Amino acid sequence: MEIRILEAAEAELDDAVEYYNAESPGLGDEFLLEFIKSVERIKNYPDAWHPFSKATRRCRLNRFPYAIIYHPHNENIDIIAVACLHRRPGYWKKRLKF
């Protein structure tokens, strides 16, 4: 399986890392490490999380109030959003193009 991250999701990831590093030096790096571990779990077990919408699934990060919204299809997994759970729900749905 190939992991592809939408540009908007990558920007959200960068923003979250920057935010947490500003809160406490090194915390953003811990966030990034948890994100990477979660992506590896998604890659190995893409159907392990319940459907979140018609075409997506959601994997919540353990330590941070974030979730990875992804779309598994064929041999790819598209990461649609790195969503802060305190933001308005569903803001990322306009990114779906199928």
Image (spheres, rainbow, N blue to C red):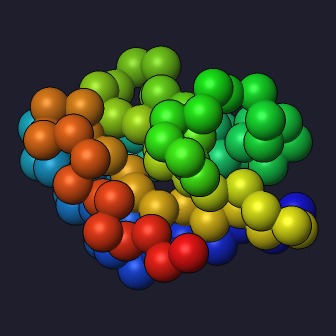
| Quarter the C terminus occupies | bottom right
Q: Residue at x 37, y 71 (%)?
A: 95
Q: Is residue 75 above or below residue 24?
A: below
Q: Is residue 54 left or right of residue 47?
A: left
Residue 39 appears left or right of 1 = left
Nearer to us in this view, 50 or 38:
50
- Tell whether 68 sits left or right of 74: left
Q: Residue at x 55, y 61 (%)?
A: 79
* 52 lies above or below 4: above
Tell me what residue is drawn at x 29 percent, y 27 percent: 65
Specify the quadrant of the image occupied by residue 78.
bottom right
In this view, the residue farthest toward the top is 62
Q: Can the viewer see residue 24? A: no
Q: Quadrant location of residue 96? A: bottom left
Q: Quadrant of the N terminus?
A: bottom right
Q: Residue at the location (72% across, 56% down)?
A: 72
* Count of labels in the image: 0
Asked if residue 1 can be seen in this view, the reply is yes
Q: Position of residue 91 (x, y in %)?
A: 21, 54
Question: Quadrant of the rendered structure where residue 38 is?
Answer: top right
Q: Position of residue 93 (x, y in %)?
A: 34, 59
Q: Is residue 97 above or below residue 67?
A: below
Front residue of this view, candidates 25 and 65? 65
